[in-house]
């Protein structure tokens, strides 16, 4: 999505450690009209696929997940990163390593929200090593749901998570794929 690449170049900032700061529009402050554009493109990419739910992880995946679910006119489910008092009953859980936070968390969803009747679209803001998507896929599998594919806003192609997931058979559609980035050299997108 050319518009996303241009917005990253204009508003993004590459920080040390292969971190891309896009808080001004994607994962802290949300540029709602632009989020809607990304969601429309995501819905177009998965048009004709019988998606019954969008599955994402808190917190940064929620905005895009909601916008895509709205376009597809289906519910959105988000995995919590910690068990809370309002999550009870049978649980689906997957251990996930967070690249951004350099720690493990347990992604948790109530089993009643993902069942064998569902075909889920996995959605997240970033794809680096693919750990969050693997965790979401595991939650879907535990619930018996089919996986339609994954929609990602920004993929760090140089970290190879997307390549590995595609090789394993998951359909991954990324709106922007970064092949190189550094604080000194900026960002280079896959053509």
Image (cartoon, grey):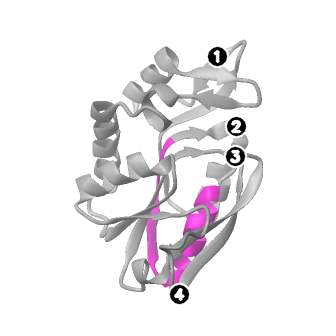
Q: Residues within 10 Å of mark 1 (few under 14, many from 20)?
A: some
- Residue appearing at x 56%, y 79% in the figure: 92
| Secondary structure under the numbered disc 4 in the rendered image | loop
- Image quadrant of residue 37? top left
The answer to which of marks 2 and 4 sits earlier in the sequence is 4
| Secondary structure under the numbered disc 3 in the rendered image | loop
Per the image, the residue denoted by label 2 is 158
Q: Is residue 4 left or right of residue 184?
A: left
Q: Is 143 placed above or below 27 here?
A: below
- Image quadrant of residue 101? top right
- Residue ranking furthest to the front: 85
Is residue 148 in the magenta section? Answer: yes
Q: Residues within 10 Å of mark 3 (few under 14, many from 20)?
A: some
Which of pointers 4 and 3 indicates the residue nearer the eye? Answer: 4
Per the image, the residue denoted by label 4 is 90
- Residue appearing at x 61%, y 75% in the figure: 93
The answer to which of marks 1 and 3 sits earlier in the sequence is 3
Q: Position of residue 46 (x, y in %)?
A: 33, 56
Mark 2 and mark 3 residues within 8 Å of each other at the beta carbon: yes
Q: Is 153 placed above or below 120 here?
A: above
User: What numbered label is drawn on residue 160?
Assistant: 3
Which of pointers 1 and 2 indicates the residue nearer the eye? Answer: 1
Q: Position of residue 17 (x, y in %)?
A: 77, 30
Mark 4 and mark 1 residues within 8 Å of each other at the beta carbon: no
């Amino acid at each position: 999505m050319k518009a996303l690449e241009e917005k990253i170049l204009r508003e993004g900032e590459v920080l040390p450690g292969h971190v891309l700061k896009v808080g001004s529009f994607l994962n802290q402050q949300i540029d709602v009209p632009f989020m809607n554009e990304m969601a429309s493109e995501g819905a177009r990419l998965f048009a004709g696929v019988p998606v019954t739910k969008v599955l994402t992880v808190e917190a940064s995946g929620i905005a895009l997940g909601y916008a895509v679910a709205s376009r597809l006119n289906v519910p959105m489910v988000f995995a919590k990163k910690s068990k809370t008092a309002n999550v009870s009953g049978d649980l689906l859980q997957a251990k996930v390593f967070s690249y951004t936070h350099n720690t493990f968390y347990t992604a948790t969803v109530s089993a009643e929200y993902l069942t064998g009747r569902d075909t889920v679209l996995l959605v997240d803001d970033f794809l680096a090593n693919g750990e969050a998507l693997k965790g979401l896929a595991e939650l879907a599998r535990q619930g018996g749901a089919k996986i339609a594919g994954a929609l990602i806003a920004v993929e760090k192609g140089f970290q190879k998570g997307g390549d590995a997931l595609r090789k394993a058979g998951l359909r991954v559609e990324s709106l922007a794929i970064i092949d190189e980035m550094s604080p000194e050299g900026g960002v280079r997108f896959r053509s």
